[in-house]
């Protein structure tokens, strides 16, 4: 079975930890229970939507800013090189991501997918992390729910 076939499908976010590379400080930047899904199609497209816990309906400009700051959403073409997953982003909630390559390292065992990001600097001003180099560790479970 090809690696693409192994990760193809829909995955539900189980956990998300982010580490400050220099200090090894671990942060739950989207809370204890973030929510999200990532989908990998067999023909090489991915779509990811991740949200922080405790988001509120938008009723003001401040709410709108908060809503944008507590979501990660993107889609693009992906390719696999060994244990590296590379996504070329073509649409994103954050325009700064369009056209970039997201480098991720992955391990898939059965219905569990672990994804580790390459070190990055956050573009989310609400995190107040400045130019600190970060790395995220995400665990996903294959979504086997039926309609």
Image (cartoon, helix red, strand yellow):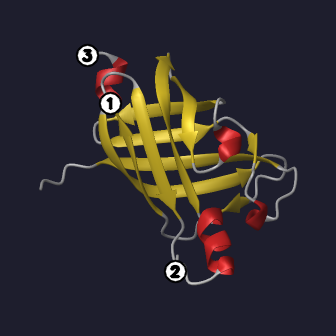
Where disc 1 sits, the SS reads: loop
Where disc 3 sits, the SS reads: loop
Q: Is residue 34 above or below residue 91?
A: below
The answer to which of marks 1 and 3 sits earlier in the sequence is: 3
Where disc 2 sits, the SS reads: loop
Instruction: Quadrant for the N terminus, please.
Output: top left
Q: For the residue carrying disc 1, how many other residues have a C-alpha within 10 Å: few (<14), some (14-19), or many (20+)?
A: some
Left or right: 45 as drawn, with respect to 128: left
The answer to which of marks 2 and 3 sits earlier in the sequence is: 3
Q: Which mark is residue 41?
A: 1
Left or right: 12 as drawn, with respect to 128: left
Question: Which residue corresponds to mark 3?
Answer: 1
Give the Cα separation between the discs numbered 1 and 2.
31 Å
Q: Nearer the viewer, residue 107 or 3?
A: 3
In the rendered image, residue 90, in percent from the top left (x then y), is placed at 55, 32
In the rendered image, residue 147, in percent from the top left (x then y), is placed at 12, 56
In the rendered image, residue 97, in percent from the top left (x then y), is placed at 66, 39
Give the Cα separation between the discs numbered 2 and 3.
42 Å
The answer to which of marks 1 and 2 sits earlier in the sequence is: 1
Residue at 62%, 73% (x, y): give it.
64
Question: Which residue corresponds to mark 2?
Answer: 56
Q: For the residue carrying disc 3, how many other residues have a C-alpha within 10 Å: few (<14), some (14-19), or many (20+)?
A: few
Residue at 82%, 59% (x, y): give it.
129
């Amino acid at each position: 079975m090809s690696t693409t076939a192994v990760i193809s499908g829909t995955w539900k976010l189980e956990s998300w930890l982010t580490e400050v590379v220099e200090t090894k400080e671990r942060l739950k930047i989207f809370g204890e229970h973030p929510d999200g899904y990532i989908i990998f199609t067999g023909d090489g497209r991915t779509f990811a939507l991740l949200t922080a816990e405790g988001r509120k309906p938008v009723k003001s400009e401040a709410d709108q800013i908060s809503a944008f700051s507590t979501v990660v959403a993107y889609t693009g073409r992906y390719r696999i090189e060994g244990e590296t997953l590379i996504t070329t982003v073509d649409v994103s909630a954050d325009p700064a991501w369009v056209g970039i390559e997201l480098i991720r390292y992955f391990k898939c065992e059965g219905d569990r997918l672990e994804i580790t990001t390459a070190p990055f600097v956050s573009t989310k001003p609400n995190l107040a992390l400045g130019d600190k180099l970060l790395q995220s560790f995400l665990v996903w479970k294959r979504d086997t729910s039926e309609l």
